[in-house]
Image (cartoon, rainbow, N blue to C red):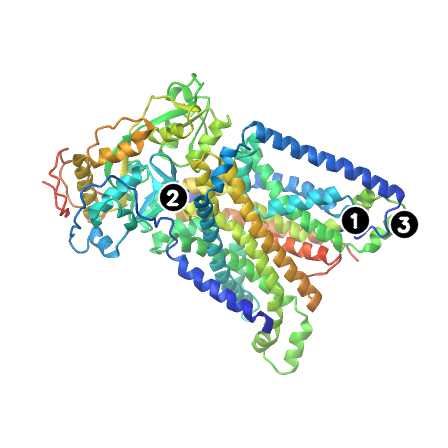
């Protein structure tokens, strides 16, 4: 047994190192740099004690769930190990409203995590992430488990086919054909309800669907047009979008149910960046590059949450608000 | 490594047949490989543009980070599993029926369900009970519980494989059951378990790829993200597979060497536990490396 | 727990699919593994090399990686199969490696006297293998092979990654639809135990039946 003492020592050292590193398994700590063109540096606001914003400030970082595999919206870039896309930019702008500072180094305060379609609610519920900005469609079923701020963008479900396919023009043409989407996602459910005669192939991620389309195993891929556009842009000359959106998919920011203070703060912040043009600039830098013209930002929906601690809020605020950059405390809106 | 049971060497006819079959089979295999490669080339899968991203050091670092995450969770889980496994093995060999029964239930239950189910339960079920951990620990928890059951079986088989004479001699010296277990049996059985632990580590490393489903950013997930970013999914998968194979192959060889050394030195038989795939492979390879019939204990 | 009983038909369908996948894959894996074992002990070097390469490459790769390579890579070699068939191919190939090694250890356990006697009466290598050695070898490795089948039952749960639904994905779908994951997963666990535990008993029974009485 004496000979194995060294083995035990090695194992112990490895174990301690692993345990020490294990906790903060960072897939998101990113070196700051090269973000937006510099806006004015925000002052660090103060929040009432006990609110999520105050807690995040004292913690010094916010954990955000995003997608890692959707070009234009949330995609992990292996060359610089950063996540890029419109969702990411929105998350950064919200974080700026919490921590203050300049856009160039706000990323050091954000820890990104991959929030795949089935994981989003669970991650919010158990606190793995503080908020989710991941092509997260607002719907009533999800509102049973979490709350949404926003919407910050209205996408629509559409269909992507190979360039030379002229047979499929709209959702009803999918009947009797092979189409592809992600399991347990809103687009998949829409197809199951609207066109049950469609032969639905289901994968865990959209890029698998795209590959299936490329291999000719399916005739189309259906999901939000914003997601599809990213794939079309990544493989030019291969695919095209039918261009006939048949649903509205409002993208929201997922937060814990009943956390009205946080939700109100995010909604305030969204309205602020709508008015200041930061939202439009974020769009141009990401989705805009895929050829989508910058739309008008959607009105945020300040609904009454069904969760604990719900306070009565009034009807959705108007599109124009005074942009108070310094202090964004959560107040009941008039 | 010629067939150990041929008895005598091949005669002239046998040698000729062997030579003909060798040439034919070599041609057939080479033919398959050539066809596969040419078809890959036709589809553009061998194009430099698809392979080039992997020469980029930052991409390499990105993937190696994934390997590190994989190894990290595997090592931590293995340590936890060893602890649980040891407890389970001792509990199953306990003289107290309820303890024995509990341990048996644990082992049979967790060995009978898929690991992915345990991981989902850990990551999606536990939080509703107020358990609040990081993704790393949800994955590790699932792996520890599962492999704890498997290692429990392995340890028990290892302890039982020890010659009864040892414990009988201990009793005759007046040691109690637990004294004999802790002072005589386990120290000797422990060294038999090391190759088994290493081979189970191979299985563990492969199983970490399931972590991607709950958001643990390990090697397979990183490879898929890379493949999606550069639109070279096949190449990315290939690179990931190569990385896994290199690490696992090295570990398997280590396990086999340890197993052979142990058999030679201590004359120990192998530990055979049903359903533990990599352990069976290591046992078989060690046996073959030693040139034939080695007994299997338990 | 009513979630389970409300969706009992979905669970049962998932069980059926899992069983179907596993049984078919195991049957193919047995044939494949036995043949590869034969390769690995044969005196023909290219066959030995092919067998070893296959075993070492496939068993050291995670099953998920193999599934993805099959579905997203093989079409580029011109081999495009339905997802179901692809799942069976991958599961068979993966399980076949373990079958091959187990059978090989069984072959080695058959005493050389048997082979020598076979040579003495003039049997060729293939004849020795198939008529004398294999029947004895296979009967000694029934237990490990049963364990491999049970492992396959569990491994089939990964087929969902390539669009092949079975029991685990059924539990996931129900859990997502009803937002009650724990009952759904417990139901799936119970269903798997209903498959694996009886399999264990069946294996023990088979082992007793075919045991070589010396």
In the rendered image of this protein, does residue B176 appear above or below residue A88?
A: below
For label 1, the residue is C133
Using the image, tell me which numbered label, if any, was put on residue C76.
none
**Residue A67 percent location from the top left of the image:** 36, 40
Residue B243 shown left or right of residue A203 in the figure: right
Choose the circle earlier in sequence order: 3 or 1: 3
Residue B116 shown left or right of residue A187 in the figure: right
- Distance between the alpha carbons at the discs numbered 1 and 2: 58 Å
- Mark 1 belongs to chain: C
Q: Do labels 1 and 2 share a chain?
A: no
Residue A37 visible? The answer is yes
Mark 2 burial class by Cα count in 10 Å: few <14, some 14-19, many 20+? few
Image point 85% across, 43% down: which residue? B15
Q: Quadrant of the C terminus of chain C?
A: bottom right
**Residue A165 percent location from the top left of the image:** 44, 18
For label 2, the residue is A80
In this figure, what is the number of numbered marks? Answer: 3
Q: Which residue lies furthest to the top in this view?
A: A166
Return the residue nearer the eye: C187 or A113. A113
For label 3, the residue is C120
Residue C197 visible? The answer is no
Q: Is mark 1 on a helix, strand or loop?
A: helix
């Amino acid at each position: 047994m004496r000979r194995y003492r060294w083995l035990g020592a090695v194992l112990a050292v490895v174990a301690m190192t692993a345990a020490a590193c294990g906790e903060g398994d960072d897939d998101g700590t990113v070196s700051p740099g090269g973000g937006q063109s510099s806006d004015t540096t925000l002052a660090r606001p103060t929040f009432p004690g006990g609110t999520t914003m105050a807690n995040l400030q004292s913690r010094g970082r916010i954990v955000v769930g995003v997608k890692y595999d959707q070009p234009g919206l949330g995609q992990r870039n292996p060359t610089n190990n950063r996540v890029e896309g419109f969702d990411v930019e929105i998350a950064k702008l919200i974080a700026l409203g919490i921590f203050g500072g300049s856009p160039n180094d706000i990323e050091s305060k954000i820890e990104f995590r991959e929030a795949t379609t089935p994981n989003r609610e669970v991650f919010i519920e158990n606190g793995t992430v503080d908020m989710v900005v991941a092509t997260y469609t607002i719907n009533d079923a999800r509102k049973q488990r979490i709350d949404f701020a926003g919407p910050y963008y209205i996408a629509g479900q559409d269909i992507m086919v190979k360039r030379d396919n002229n047979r499929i023009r709209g959702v009803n043409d999918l009947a009797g054909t092979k189409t592809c989407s992600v399991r347990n996602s809103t687009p998949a459910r829409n197809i199951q309800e609207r066109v049950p005669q469609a032969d639905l192939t289901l994968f865990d991620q959209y890029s698998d669907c795209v590959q299936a389309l490329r291999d000719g195993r399916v005739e189309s891929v259906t999901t939000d047009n914003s997601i599809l556009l990213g794939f079309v842009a990544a493989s030019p000359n291969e695919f095209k979008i039918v261009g006939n959106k048949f649903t509205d998919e409002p993208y929201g920011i997922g937060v814990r149910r009943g956390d009205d203070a946080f939700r109100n703060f995010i909604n305030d912040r969204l309205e602020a960046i709508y008015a200041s043009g930061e939202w439009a600039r974020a769009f141009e830098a990401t989705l805009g590059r895929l050829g989508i013209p910058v739309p008008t930002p959607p009105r945020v929906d300040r609904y009454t949450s069904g969760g604990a601690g719900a306070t009565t809020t009034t009807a959705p605020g108007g599109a124009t608000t005074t942009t108070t950059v310094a202090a964004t405390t959560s107040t009941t809106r008039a | 490594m010629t067939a150990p049971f041929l008895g005598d060497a091949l005669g002239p006819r046998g040698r000729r047949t062997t030579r003909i079959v060798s040439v034919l089979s070599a041609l057939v295999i080479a033919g398959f490989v050539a066809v596969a490669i040419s078809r890959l080339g036709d589809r553009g899968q061998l194009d430099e543009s698809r392979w080039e991203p992997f020469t980029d050091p930052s991409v390499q670092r990105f993937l190696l980070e994934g390997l590190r995450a994989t190894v990290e969770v595997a090592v931590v889980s293995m340590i936890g599993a060893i602890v649980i496994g040891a407890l389970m093995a001792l509990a199953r060999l306990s003289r107290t029926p309820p303890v024995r029964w509990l341990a048996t239930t644990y082992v049979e239950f967790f060995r009978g369900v898929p690991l992915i189910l345990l991981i989902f339960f850990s990551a999606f079920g536990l939080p509703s009970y107020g358990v609040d951990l990081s993704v790393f620990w949800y994955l590790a928890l699932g792996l520890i519980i599962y492999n704890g059951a498997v290692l429990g079986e392995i340890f028990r088989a290892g302890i039982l494989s020890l010659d009864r004479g040892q414990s009988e001699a201990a009793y005759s010296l007046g040691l109690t059951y637990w004294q004999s277990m802790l002072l005589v049996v386990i120290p000797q059985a422990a060294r038999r378990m090391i190759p088994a632990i290493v081979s189970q580590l191979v299985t563990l490393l492969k199983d970490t790829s399931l972590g991607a489903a709950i958001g643990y950013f390990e090697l397979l997930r990183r490879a898929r993200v890379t493949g999606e970013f550069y639109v070279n999914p096949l190449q990315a998968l290939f690179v990931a597979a190569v990385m896994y194979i290199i690490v696992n192959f090295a570990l398997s060889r280590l396990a086999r060497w340890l197993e052979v050394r142990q058999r030679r030195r201590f004359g120990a038989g192998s530990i055979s536990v049903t359903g533990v795939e990599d352990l069976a492979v290591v046992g078989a390879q060690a046996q073959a490396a030693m040139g034939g019939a080695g007994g299997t204990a338990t | 727990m009513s979630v389970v009983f409300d969706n009992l038909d979905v669970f049962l369908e998932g069980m059926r699919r899992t069983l179907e996948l596993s049984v078919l894959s195991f049957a193919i894996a047995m044939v494949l593994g036995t043949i590869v074992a034969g390769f690995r002990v044969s005196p023909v070097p290219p066959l030995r090399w092919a067998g070893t390469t296959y075993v070492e490459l496939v068993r050291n790769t995670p099953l998920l990686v193999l599934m993805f390579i099959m579905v997203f890579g093989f079409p580029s070699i011109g081999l495009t199969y339905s997802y179901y068939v692809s799942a069976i191919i991958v599961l068979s190939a993966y399980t076949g490696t373990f079958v091959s090694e187990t059978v090989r250890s069984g072959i080695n356990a058959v005493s050389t006297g048997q082979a020598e006697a076979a040579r003495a009466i003039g049997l060729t290598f293939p004849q020795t293998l198939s008529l004398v050695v294999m029947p004895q070898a296979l009967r000694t490795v029934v237990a490990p092979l049963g364990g491999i089948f049970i492992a396959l039952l569990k491994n089939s749960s990964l087929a969902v990654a390539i669009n092949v639904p079975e029991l685990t994905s059924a539990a996931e779908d129900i859990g997502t639809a009803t937002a009650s994951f724990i009952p759904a997963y417990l139901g799936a666990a119970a269903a798997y135990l209903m498959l694996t535990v009886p399999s264990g008993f069946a294996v023990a029974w088979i082992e007793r039946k075919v045991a070589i009485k010396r």
